[in-house]
Each structure stands twice: as C-alpha cells, then as structure tokens.
Amino acid sequence: MNSLELTYEIAKILDSKKGEDIKALEVREMTSIGDYFVIASGANLPQVKAMSDEVEEKLSKMGLEPKRIEGYQTASWILLDYYDVIVHIFLKETREFYSLERLWAGAQQVDLSKVLTD
C-alpha cells in the first residue's frame, strides 16, 4: 500500500466513526516528515479517542503499526505517525485554534470525495 492509498484508507476509517471535516494535505514537497497529513475533528473527547482507536485497530489488522502516538491522554489533539502519513485528530475547538490547514496553506489538498460518504 502506498502513502496515497493509506491516506484514503485512514480517511475512510475516520469517516466511519463520524469524523468531521476530514481533509488530507500532500506535504511531501514542503517537509521531510511525511507525504500526507490527514486531519479530522471530533465533537467531544470520547469521539476523538474512538476515532484514534479505530484507525489504530483497523491498520493494525492490516499489519501497520504507528511509529508513535502523541496526545492520547488529553485527547484534544491526537497524532498518529504512520511514517509517510501523519494523522491529526482534533477536538473541534483545538483544531480551530491550531489551524493546521492555514499553517500548511501551501500544501495541495487531496480529493477525498470518492472515499467519504456525504
């Protein structure tokens, strides 16, 4: 599975847990830390944790383990590092505060319309 396919898979998993405002940014030309960021919001702390748990569980079944997980205890911003794809799951207010999409405005947005439900 290449990094774009992994990005799509993660977006589908987040969507299945009712993640909100799911976006993917191609950052490979801007940084060496990865190829893509997947960004999503949850309405509350339990949902943010459930989304993180689901990504970790589903990808683990596919033989993919994160290099590291940050922020799980506080759950206002959980980062799952899958080497070439970095997943950011935010509490809605925290996402608005940090505004990663603004910070990485030069990144090309990945079209997720084929993998997300309406």
Image (cartoon, rainbow, N blue to C red):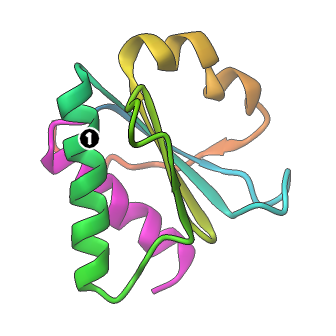
Q: Is residue 108 above or below residue 114?
A: above
Name the residue located 58 percent from the left edge and 10 percent from the top edge.
Answer: 97
Q: Is residue 101 above or below residue 15?
A: above
Quarter where residue 61 is shown: bottom left
Q: As drawn, which residue projects farthest toward the front?
A: 73
Instruction: Please give the range of residues in magenta.
Output: 1-19
Q: Is residue 42 above or below residue 23?
A: above
State the SS at label 1: helix
Return the residue at label 1.
49
Q: Is residue 73 magenta?
A: no
Q: Locate the C terminus and report the quarter of the image it occupies.
A: top left
Name the residue located 42 percent from the left edge and 29 percent from the top edge.
Answer: 90
Name the residue located 23 percent from the left edge and 69 percent from the top edge.
Answer: 57
| Camera-nearest residue between 62 and 101 | 62
Name the amino acid type tagged 1: Lys
Left or right of 45? Residue 37 is right
Left or right of 5? Residue 50 is left
Name the residue located 68 percent from the left edge and 44 percent from the top edge.
Answer: 108
| Camera-nearest residue between 94 and 16 | 94
**Residue 114 visible from this viewpoint:** no
Image location of residue 4, percent across then percent down: 52, 69
Quarter where residue 5 is shown: bottom left
Left or right of 57? Residue 77 is right
Prevailing secondary structure class for the magenta stretch in the rendered image: helix
Q: Is residue 76 above or below residue 109?
A: above
